[in-house]
Image (cartoon, grey):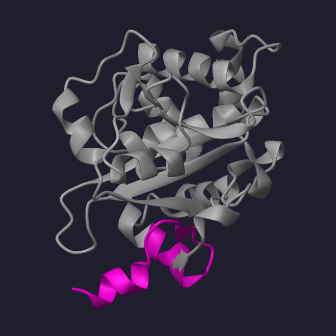
Amino acid sequence: MSENVKKNDLGDLGCFNNCNSLASIPTLYFEINTKIGIDSSSDEYDKALQIGKYLRSTMKGGPGIGLSSQETLEKMLANKGGVCSDFSQIFNIFCFINNIKVKEWGCIDRFYKTQFGHSFNEIYSSDKQKWVAIDIHKGIVFTDNTGSPLSVVELFLTLRSGNHVNFTHYSDYVSPDHDRTPRVYAPYTIPFIISNNKNDVTDFYFEKYQNILSPILINSLILLRRKNHKFLFVMDDYKAKLRSK
């Protein structure tokens, strides 16, 4: 499930848009998208912030969901749950249908006895000519001392070099667990891209088996049939980390 990738060779690697089709997206997403009121003339970065503001103003979040994209969105709209991975999942889709290139990232503190795992995103801005990190669940973006938004790699390089990163809230939402943010985004944190993230595959297996199998078993089935996504480590050699147990 895991691979090492050089951080200088990322480009569009892991881009959600490249392995999905609009035909696979549930109609509900298009219906909700009309309520967001996205300015079609805006840069992708501004559009992404508009999506993030809407999601965080209408969804309280809660326990993890991890179902098909249709059911995940339905439950989140009804305020019946939603953790970071659920927010990342639906954000991917809203970006996709608005022609915003998007990637999903994860990060962990360590490989053994992990204390936390977190999901967030990165979008491509045409105006800025770069990928920009955005955390929908926490409602924050990351900037350097000049106010310039950081890509995910820039974010963690800055943290590892000991330089200051600004965690900026882009909406009225502020996470009640704000002390956790600097623990998640820290010099020791290990980031990875979630690649081969095919929405139609996830939806197919969950819609077919969710009434007879647990989410863990469904994900195991996806893995056994080699339909799973991959974790691409871009700043750390995961094999070396595993050997250093």
The spot of residue 67 in percent (x, y) is: 47, 50
Residue shown at 46% from the left, 58% from the top: 210
Inspect this view and state whether residue 214 appears. no
Determine the residue located farthest toward the bottom in the rendered image: 243
Q: Is residue 233 left or right of residue 41?
A: left
Residue shown at 45% from the left, 15% from the top: 58
Residue shown at 36% from the left, 27% from the top: 167
Task: Determine which quarter of the picture holds residue 48.
Answer: top right
Inspect this view and state whether residue 200 appears. yes
| Nearer the observer, 134 or 240 | 240
The spot of residue 27 in percent (x, y) is: 72, 32
Quadrant (top left, top right, bottom left, bottom right) of the C terminus: bottom left
The spot of residue 151 in percent (x, y) is: 56, 42
Task: Determine which quarter of the picture holds residue 45.
Answer: top right
Q: Is residue 111 magenta?
A: no
| Nearer the observer, 27 or 116 | 116
Q: Is residue 34 left or right of residue 154?
A: right
| Nearer the observer, 58 or 41 | 41
Compared with 25, 47 (above or below) is above
Total marks shown come to 0
| Nearer the observer, 224 or 238 | 238
Q: Give the residues in magenta.
A: 219-245
Q: Is residue 241 magenta?
A: yes
The spot of residue 146 in percent (x, y) is: 50, 23
Q: Is residue 58 left or right of residue 36?
A: left
Compared with 237, 187 (above or below) is above
Residue shown at 40% from the left, 72% from the top: 217
Task: Determine which quarter of the picture holds residue 126.
Answer: top right
